[in-house]
Image: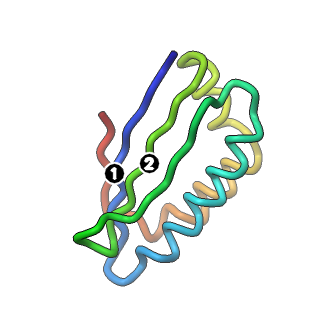
Amino acid sequence: MYQLDGEFVAKENCGDELFGYLSEASKEMEKLPECNAYHVEKDSDSPDIIHVHEEWTDEAAHLNSLQLDVTQKLIENAKPIIKGMERE
């Protein structure tokens, strides 16, 4: 199994919009048989920080998911409001 934990920091006052994009990504990714989990949640202390936990069958499945048209569109929409990102 391949797991990722990420923290996305939205530009000021854009947390809800970013949460929407990441929640939409969650719905799309969980349709894929290689995706075991894709959880999105808001940070309890900051409205502009969103946490994402992903579980995939393997790293290749995760990388393939990034090439899907729906994923590319979500990335394109979210990019302008992302201030920073960390992955574990």
Q: Which residue is mark 2?
A: 52
Secondary structure of residue under mark 2? strand
Q: Is residue 63 left or right of residue 10?
A: right
Q: Position of residue 47 (x, y in %)?
A: 33, 75
When the figure is inspected, residue 4 is found, relative to residue 2, above or below; the finding is below
Q: Which mark is first along the chain, 1 or 2?
A: 1
Asked if marks 2 and 1 touch (Cβ < 8 Å), the reply is yes
Say what amino acid the circle numbered 1 marks.
Glu
Q: CA distance from mark 2 to mark 1?
A: 6 Å
> Image check: 16 left or right of 42?
right
* 40 lies above or below 53: below
Find residue 19 and report its horizontal and vertical position in percent: 50, 67
Marker disc for residue 7: 1
Q: Position of residue 86 (x, y in %)?
A: 29, 45
Judged from the image, the secondary structure of the residue bearing numbered disc 1 is strand
Q: Nearer the viewer, residue 41 or 8?
A: 41
